[in-house]
Image (cartoon, rainbow, N blue to C red):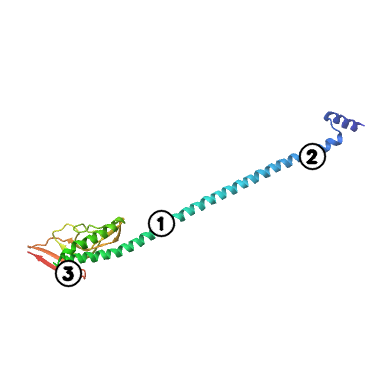
Amino acid sequence: MGDADDEDNMACETGMEPDTQEKVGPKMVTQDGKADTRIEDLRNTLDEHERESKEQLDRLVRVQADFDNFRKRVERDRDDLAKTAAEGLILRVLEVVDNLDRAIEHMRTDERTQEHTRGVEMIKDQLLGVLAVEGLQEMECLDKPFDPLYHEAIARETMDDVDAETVSEVFQKGYTLKGKVIRHARVKVTVPVAKKEGSGKERSTTNANGSQENDKEE
C-alpha cells in the first residue's frame, strides 16, 4: 500500500497519471536529440555547399583568366603575323626603290635622259611617301658614328684624321619600320689610327672582297 500511495502522491504533484509520466519523459528526450542531430546535419550540408560554391567560383575565375590570356596571345600572334607580312611586302617594294635610285643616278650622267630625271624622282618620292604613312623611315647614316645595330660594314678604311668609327659611304640605304630595323644600311666605315712618325698621312682601305689598299698622302 505504501508504494501505491507514493505513486498516487507523485501523480498528484505532476498532474499526470503514473503510467503516462513514465512514457512521456523518455519520448521527449528522444525528440530533442533528433532535432539537434537534424540541425547539425543541415549545418554540415550548408558548409559543404558553401565549400563547393567557393571551389566552383575559383575554377570559374581561373578559366576566365586562362581565356583572357588566350585571347591576348591570339591577338598578339595576329598582330605579329600582320607585321611580318607588311615587312616582307615593304622589303620587296624597297628593292624597286633601289632600282629607281640606280636609274636616277644613271640618268643624271646621260644628257639625253636628264630631263626625265625629275619625273622618276617624283615617282620614287611618291612611293616612299606611301610607305612612310605605314611607318617606314630612311636611316641617316653618312658621316654618322658607326652603330652595328643599324649599320652593316662591308668595307673599312683607316685614317689618322678621324676620332671614332664613322660611316664614310653608303652602298645601300637602311630603313626602319615603326622604330624596328627591317634593313640594315650597308656602309663603308672609317676607323681612326695612330699617327706615324714622318711626313704625310697614311690611309688603309679594306674592300668588301677582303683586299686591302694603302695610300700615302704627302
Q: Quadrant of residue 176?
A: bottom left
List the residue tagged with mark 2: 27
Question: Vertically, is 107 above or below 7?
Answer: below
Marks 1/3 in contact by CB < 8 Å: the verdict is: no
Q: Residue at x 86, y 34 (%)?
A: 18
**Residue 155 appears in the picture as rendered:** no
Which amino acid type is shown beneath numbered disc 2?
Lys
Q: Which mark is residue 209?
A: none
User: Picture coordinates of residue 209 (x, y %)?
Assistant: 21, 71
- Assign a secondary structure to mark 1: helix
Which amino acid type is shown beneath numbered disc 1?
Arg
Q: CA distance from mark 2 to mark 1?
A: 73 Å
Quarter the N terminus occupies: top right
Q: Observer-nearest residue: 131 or 153?
A: 131
- Assign a secondary structure to mark 2: helix
Left or right of 177, for residue 4: right
Left or right of 49, for residue 111: left
List the residue tagged with mark 3: 212
**Residue 215 appears in the picture as rendered:** yes
Q: Observer-nearest residue: 129 or 98?
A: 129
Q: Quadrant of residue 74?
A: bottom left
Q: Residue at x 79, y 39 (%)?
A: 27
User: Picture coordinates of residue 16 (x, y %)?
Assistant: 84, 32
What is the crowding at mark 3: few (fewer than 14 residues within 10 Å), some, or many (at least 20)? Answer: few
Q: Observer-nearest residue: 33 or 145?
A: 145
- Residue mark closest to the camera, 2 vs 1: 1
Of pointers 3 and 2, the one earlier in the residue sequence: 2
Of pointers 1 and 3, the one earlier in the residue sequence: 1
Of pointers 2 and 1, the one earlier in the residue sequence: 2
